[in-house]
């Protein structure tokens, strides 16, 4: 009976040792996994901060481009305002009556000056062309 008790105790000790080894091994694997996750997280944080910096740079570039386009459109509206001075009735009527018809060469010279100006993007060029057509049609009606 003593031998059976000794064998049973030895089997229990082996089972406890195996369980202890498994716990230690799992703890090491978990620690290694956490270290890998931390390294991955730091790499992702770096990538994310780079993406945010790039997005901020692009937003600033877009703001600058928008400001430049707005400036060109304001200049275009100012130029169009010179083409059709005043919109209130009596003043606009007198201005049209006082204005002499432009010689054909003056309009061609004006177009040449527009071509020499910095190139507009296609949307601005289309807007300018549409506005010129509208103002030309409005001038013929008046």
Image (tube, grey):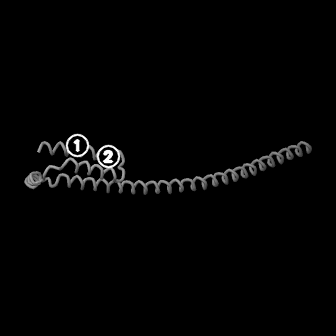
Rendering coords of residue 77 (x, y %): 25, 53
Q: Which mark is residue 52?
A: none
Taking the spot 32% from the left edge, 54% from the top edge, the residue there is 72
Instruction: Name the quadrant containing residue 65.
Output: bottom left
Rendering coords of residue 81 (x, y %): 20, 54
Residue at numbered disc 2: 125
Residue at numbered disc 1: 133
Rendering coords of residue 36 (x, y %): 67, 52
Taking the spot 47% from the left edge, 54% from the top edge, the residue there is 55
Taking the spot 24% from the left edge, 54% from the top edge, the residue there is 79
Q: Quarter holding the C terminus?
A: top left
Q: Earlier in the sequence, mark 1 or mark 2?
A: 2
Near-viewer residue (99 or 45): 99
Taking the spot 87% from the left edge, 46% from the top edge, the residue there is 10
Dot 1 and dot 2 residues touching (CB under 8 Å): no
For the residues marked 1 and 2, what is the alpha-carbon distance in whole angstroms? 12 Å
Q: Quarter holding the N terminus?
A: top right
- Disc 2 secondary structure class: helix
Near-viewer residue (43 or 129): 129
């Amino acid at each position: 009976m003593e031998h059976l008790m000794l064998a049973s105790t030895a089997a229990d000790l082996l089972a406890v040792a195996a369980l202890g080894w498994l716990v230690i091994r799992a703890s090491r694997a978990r620690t290694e996994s956490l270290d890998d996750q931390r390294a991955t997280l730091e790499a992702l944080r770096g990538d994310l901060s780079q993406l945010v910096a790039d997005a901020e740079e692009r937003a600033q570039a877009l703001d600058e481009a928008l400001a430049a386009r707005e400036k060109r459109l304001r200049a275009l509206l100012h130029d169009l305002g010179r083409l059709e001075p005043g919109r209130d009735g009596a003043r606009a009527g007198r201005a049209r009556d006082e204005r002499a018809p432009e010689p054909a060469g003056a309009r061609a010279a004006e177009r040449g000056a527009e071509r020499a100006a910095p190139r507009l993007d296609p949307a601005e060029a289309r807007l300018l062309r549409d506005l010129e057509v509208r103002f030309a049609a409005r001038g013929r009606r008046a």
